[in-house]
Amino acid sequence: MEKMNLIIDIGNTVAKIALFDGDSLVDVVHDSNRTLERLPDICSHYDVERAIMVTVVDLSEEAEARLCNLPCPLLRLGADTPLPVENLYETPETLGYDRMAAVVGACARFPGRDILVIDAGTCITYELVDAAGRYHGGNISPGLQMRFKALHQFTGRLPLVEPEGRILPVGKDTDTAIRAGVLRGVEYEIEGYIHSMRTKYPELLVFLTGGDEFSFDTNLKSIIFADRFLVLKGLNRILVYNNDKI
């Protein structure tokens, strides 16, 4: 059995655990971001040589214990981790490094290009990296579910509407008005970012990731590349880049 790279991406709602054989993605498993309960079983099925972890939540004692019991060295991605791109973020210690991983994943695929990475998950993030490999930073916006829940929780009478359902150009009842308002609002927001960025970077490439929360990406004609596993691929690239440091 080939030795694998173990990639652990702990998000706001779920943890994704991936295995890479070199640059090839072998398997992806979804796990609890609180317990990482599937991690020991995954490690018993694969011969893992090294691991990297990034988290956007505070780790529970149970999750921390499972990470400490990994059968291989673990690189915890953070502000001090060497990266294959230059980080121009003014407060690197506050940066969610899943955002940086997506940038690294896109740059690895198309080095020497201006790139906008859009990650549509719990939040929607917009990350800009230029052709010289300089990460300029990005913006954070509420994701789809967050917008639907906010309309329900911060009003007296608006219902909680699901993204799936009838979508009209103009809502004909409360459900279709909310659904079209949220979905079209996100769509127009993304198109606006792309248009604005392309005024400065005419050859801008656009990546979309985080597809679990993004059901209408095919309507966005400006999206050039869609890759649901871009963050995982970027984490693997960072792990390889730091191979002699762990």
Image (cartoon, rainbow, N blue to C red):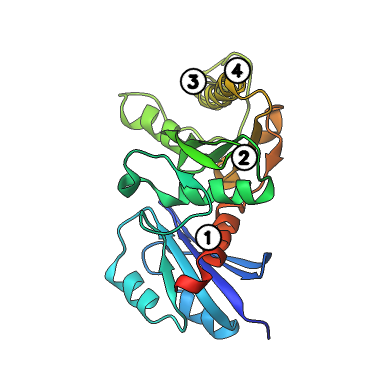
N-terminal of the two: label 4 or label 1?
4
- Tag 3 secondary structure: helix
Q: Which of 155 and 97 is in front in this view?
A: 97
Q: Mark 2 points at which residue?
A: 208
Q: Residues within 10 Å of mark 3 (few under 14, many from 20)?
A: few
Where is residue 45? Give x, y as percent.
Answer: 59, 83
Which residue in the rendered view is the most extreme toward the left? 61
Q: Name the residue under label 1.
A: 238
Q: Mark 4 points at which residue?
A: 199
Query: Which is closer to the viewer, label 3 or label 1?
Result: 1
Q: Is residue 67 above or below residue 174?
A: below
Q: Which of 172 and 26 is in front in this view?
A: 26
Inter-mark Cα distance, 3 to 4 = 37 Å
Q: Name the residue under label 3.
A: 174
Where is residue 61? Give x, y as percent.
Answer: 27, 71
Q: How crowded is mark 1: few (under 14 residues within 10 Å), some or many (20 or more)?
A: many
Marks 3 and 1 in Cβ contact (< 8 Å): no
